[in-house]
Image: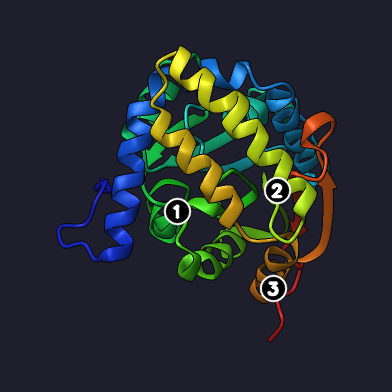
Amino acid sequence: MLRKRPAVVGPVETRGAQLSDEFDRAADRYDLLTRLNPGYHQALSTAARALVSLLPRRSDDEPFVLWDLGCGSGLSTRALVDAAGDRTRVVGLDASAGMLSRARAKTWPDGVRFVQAFAQSLPEVARDHVGRDADGAFAAYLLRNVPEEQRDDVVTAIHDQVQPGGWVALQDYHVKHDRVASAVWTVVCWGVVMPLSFLVRGNPAIYRYLWRSVVDNDSTAQLQARLERAGLTDIRWHTGTGWQRGILHTVLARRPEKDPA
C-alpha cells in the first residue's frame, strides 16, 4: 500500500504534503464550488469524450483501462465513465486523502478504483494497481500542482504508462504571456471565486493558491515543449468557451505506435 508521504521528506515533498493538506481542508465544499463555476463540468465532459473518441478500439472486447490523474473528488472520473461506459476500468490517483474520501463515497461501477499517491509515484502505482499499459490517461488541473522541476518527469511517466497508440488528455488553465487572459483570470478569482469560498466556508487559502498557481503555470508553449520532449505526438489544442476562452485549455497527444529508438 502506498504511503501518503515518505518517511523522510525534502523541500519538494514537503511542498506537496502541505498542498495535499490544503486540499483535504477544501474537500467538503469543493464539489459545491465547482457547481457554481459555469462550464466546469461541461469542459470536463467535452475533454473526456474527446479522449475516448480517439482511443484505439480493442479487438478482444476488453474494457478500456484509463488513468484519471489528479482525480480529486471524482468529477473527472465521472466524466470518463460517462464517456467510455460502465465497463471501463478507471484508476483515479490523487494525493489528498480528503478529496479521495469524497470520491470513494460516490456510487461507481465495479471497474473504478482510487489510489492515494502523488503523480510522481505513477510508475509504482501502475505496477501495483493496473498490470498493463493503459489505453489512455486524463489529467485535469494536475501539472501546475507538480513542482516545475518535476513536470517533465511526470509527463514522461504518463507517456510511459499509456500503451503505444494510446492517447493522453490534459486540461488546465494557462494564462502565462497572455495579458488579457491573465487579467480576466485575476478578476474572476478575486471578484467571484474568493468571495464564494468565504460564503460557503470552502477554505479560501486553497483558492488563493489556485489563483497564484495558474498565474505561474506553464504557458501553452511550455507545455507543448514538455509533451514533445516526452515523445508525445499528434498534439492538438482546444480552448474553453465563455469566460474560459483563452484561459482554459485542453491538449490531446498520442504515444506513437513505435517510440524512437
The reply, left or right, for residue 100 in relation to residue 41 is: left
Q: Is residue 206 left or right of residue 97?
A: right
The residue that appears at 64% across and 72% down in the rendered structure is 230
Amino acid type at circle 3 is Gly
- Crowding around mark 2 (Cα neighbors within 10 Å: few <14, some 14 to 19, many 20+) is some
Q: Secondary structure at mark 1?
A: helix
Residue annotated with mark 1? 119
Q: Earlier in the sequence, mark 3 or mark 1?
A: 1
**C-alpha distance separating marks 1 and 2:** 27 Å
Evaluate whether residue 253 shows in this view: yes
Q: Residue at x 79, y 31 (%)?
A: 243
Disc 3 + disc 1, Cβ < 8 Å: no
Task: Report which residue position mark 3 lands on.
Answer: 231
Q: Are marks 3 and 2 in contact (CB under 8 Å)?
A: no
Check residue 182 in the rendering and tell me which mark sits there, or answer none.
2
Front-lying residue, 201 or 85: 201
Q: How is the image coloured?
A: rainbow
* Residue drawn at 39 percent across, 18 percent down: 28
Q: Earlier in the sequence, mark 3 or mark 2?
A: 2
